[in-house]
Image: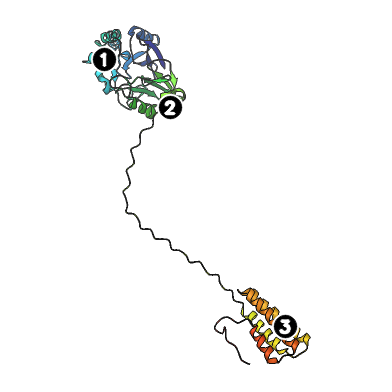
């Protein structure tokens, strides 16, 4: 059960929370103690303590009078606050509030100073993870607005009392003594943003909201400046590595293709056959010459020197024809045909066989 009472000149939200049927706690009584007590009576509840989200006087101005009122009725109301904000209660509280309210107008400072003289001391210390007066509320430390700012969270009820840490579409101010914008951002990002989106948020001022709504609409909630990264160390200078000069590749010579052995053998045999036809009929000689020329062309096709081989075969054919036509001696024709042969390559290249 959550009941809100708007109190004091700054319209502070004072909450009455109960997770049982009869007992309740009062959160942030910032003024109008009679109205707070009247609302508790209407709800037929018995308060068992007062919990403060932080130590600013607009959230605790009615502490002294409210505690005295219930003491006259036989009820004891212990006061709970985070140790970092205990300086705002008890002895020396007036000076602490004067220091934190220097930015305000003199009339407002006078109003709060008058109430601050009646502030009692704290009875219970609230730390991270503590339960608040045995209620279904857990303390969540959220420094930033003040050093001891806390929120009260109930997972079962799905509610969060955020104090002045988070408002509807806003956050608490960070220009007062002890405030820190960096810590406030960290508190929101690490403590509130991780809560379920449907969690209802009851702030210290203004209307209630939800975590999901603030994720979408609160500029401070969803935009946080990235933390500066430390400069990367310079790498050690290493000795320059000696680079090898690129080796120039010699242009490869074209390979000489040598005709296969059967082709060479066939060319030699045709040359011998052409020599034997000298002095025989022209038809026999022509047939022999044709076979020889074909063999020589085959050698040229399968070898590297095509043009010289073809040229030699043509010369050989012409000389054989001329010798046979003029009826020269066999010896002369034999020498001409021998010169027309394509020399074999290898160890036997350039050698002439005698007959």
- How packed mark 3 is, by other alpha carbons closer than 10 Å (few <14, some 14-19, many 20 or more), is many
Q: Quadrant of the C terminus?
A: bottom right
Q: Which mark, by number, is residue 143?
A: none
Q: CA distance from mark 2 to mark 1?
A: 32 Å
Which residue matches tag 3?
289
Q: CA distance from mark 2 to mark 3?
A: 102 Å
- Residue furthest front in the image: 326
Quarter of the image for residue 323 reads bottom right
- Residue furthest left in the image: 91
Q: How is the image coloured?
A: rainbow
Is 129 in front, or is 345?
345
Is 108 in front, or is 165?
108
- How packed mark 1 is, by other alpha carbons closer than 10 Å (few <14, some 14-19, many 20 or more), is many
Residue drawn at the location 78% of the way across and 86% of the way down: 282
Residue drawn at the location 67% of the way across and 76% of the way down: 297
Which residue matches tag 2?
222
First reached walking from the N terminus: tag 1 or tag 3: 1
Quarter of the image for residue 73 reads top left
The residue tagged with tag 1: helix, strand or loop? helix
Residue drawn at the location 44% of the way across and 20% of the way down: 209
């Amino acid at each position: 059960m959550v009941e809100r009472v708007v109190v004091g000149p700054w319209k502070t939200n004072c909450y009455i929370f109960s997770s049982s049927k009869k007992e309740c706690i009062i959160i942030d009584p910032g003024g109008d103690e009679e109205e707070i007590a009247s609302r508790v009576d209407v709800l037929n509840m018995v308060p068992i303590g007062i919990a403060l989200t932080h130590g600013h006087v607009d959230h605790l101005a009615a502490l002294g009078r409210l505690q005295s009122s219930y003491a006259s009725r036989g009820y004891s109301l212990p006061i709970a606050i985070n140790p970092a904000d205990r300086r705002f209660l008890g002895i020396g509280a007036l000076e602490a509030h004067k220091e934190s309210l220097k930015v305000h107008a003199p009339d407002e400072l006078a109003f709060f100073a008058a109430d601050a003289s009646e502030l009692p001391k704290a009875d219970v210390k609230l730390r991270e993870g503590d339960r608040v007066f045995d209620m279904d509320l857990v303390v969540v430390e959220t420094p930033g607005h003040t050093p001891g700012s806390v929120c009260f969270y109930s997972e079962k009820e799905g509610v969060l009392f955020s104090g002045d840490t988070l408002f509807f579409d806003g956050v608490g101010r960070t220009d007062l003594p002890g405030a820190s914008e960096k810590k406030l951002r960290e508190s929101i990002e690490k403590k509130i943003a991780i809560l379920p989106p449907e969690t209802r948020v009851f702030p210290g001022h203004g209307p209630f909201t939800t975590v999901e709504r603030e994720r979408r609409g609160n500029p401070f909630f969803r935009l946080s400046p990235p933390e500066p990264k430390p400069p990367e160390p310079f790498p050690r200078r290493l000795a320059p590595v000696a680079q090898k000069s690129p080796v120039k590749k010699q242009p490869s010579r074209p390979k000489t293709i040598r005709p296969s052995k059967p082709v060479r053998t066939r060319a030699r045999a045709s040359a011998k056959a052409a020599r034997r036809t000298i002095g025989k009929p022209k038809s026999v000689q022509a047939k022999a010459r044709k076979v020889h020329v074909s063999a020589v062309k085959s050698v040229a096709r399968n070898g590297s020197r095509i043009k010289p081989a073809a040229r030699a075969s043509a010369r050989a054919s012409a000389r054989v024809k001329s010798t046979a036509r003029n009826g020269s001696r066999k010896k002369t024709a034999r020498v001409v045909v021998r010169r027309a042969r394509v020399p074999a390559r290898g160890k036997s290249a350039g050698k002439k066989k005698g007959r």
